[in-house]
Image (cartoon, grey):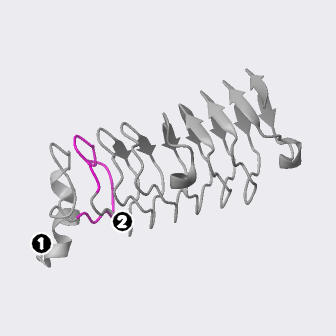
Amino acid sequence: MNYFSDQQFTKISTEKFEKADYENCIFTEINFSDHNLSDFKFSDCDFKDCDLSNAKIHQTAFREVVFKNCKMIGLNFEDAHSFNISFKFEDCILDHSSFYQLDIRKTTFKNSSLKEVDFTETNLSNSFFDHSNLTDAVFDRTILDNANLKNAINFSIDPTKNQLKKTKFAKDNLAGLLDRLQIIIE
């Protein structure tokens, strides 16, 4: 497998991308949507203003990867290589994506749209949901210990079906913990 290090890729066609190991690279304004990224390896890479919607990421390695202002609709992150998987999302659209059964502790979701994202059986311990929209996101047997949801909006988390030890919430967004109990908060 080829190896690329410390390179910048800007506005180039995905046909020019080969399956390779990319380390400390920057990808800017590239349309990866529907592209097959299976078995690619990304370590310490930044993706800026890219579209990865519906990309195939079977056994793709994401290690210390930062996504900024990226469109990532419908990605099945559970298909990615799970060893040392770690990323940060800022100003991203991750709607309809899935993190099913992944261990993604300490993940930051900043100013991101996470509508209908599946976090079933995901370990999100120490993760930070900073000003992110969680409308219809699925939390089922999810580990949210020490996670910070103080600035998250539109979440609905059943405290009887999820692990919430020392999870941080703001007083004004507690409704997302009680809505399943059909309690009226005025």
The question of residue 137 being in magenta is answered with no
Position of 151 with respect to 7 (left or right) is left
Q: Which residue is mark 2?
A: 138
Relative image position of residue 125 (x, y in whole percent): 29, 42
Q: Which residues are magenta?
A: 142-157
Relative image position of residue 138 (x, y in whole percent): 36, 65
Position of 70 with respect to 20 (left or right) is left
Q: Which residue is mark 1?
A: 185
Mark 1 crowd level (few <14, some 14–19, many ≥20, 10 Å Cα):
few
The quarter of the picture where the N terminus appears is: top right
Q: Amino acid at mark 1?
A: Ile
- Residue at screen point 48% across, 33% down: 84
- Residue at screen point 73% across, 60% down: 34
Determine whether the residue tagged by mark 2 lies in a helix, strand or loop.
loop
- Residue at screen point 15% across, 53% down: 171
Relative image position of residue 59 (x, y in whole percent): 61, 46
- Residue at screen point 69% across, 43% down: 39
Determine whether the residue tagged by mark 1 lies in a helix, strand or loop.
loop
Magenta span dominant secondary structure: loop
Upstream in sequence: badge 1 or badge 2: 2
The question of residue 152 being in magenta is answered with yes
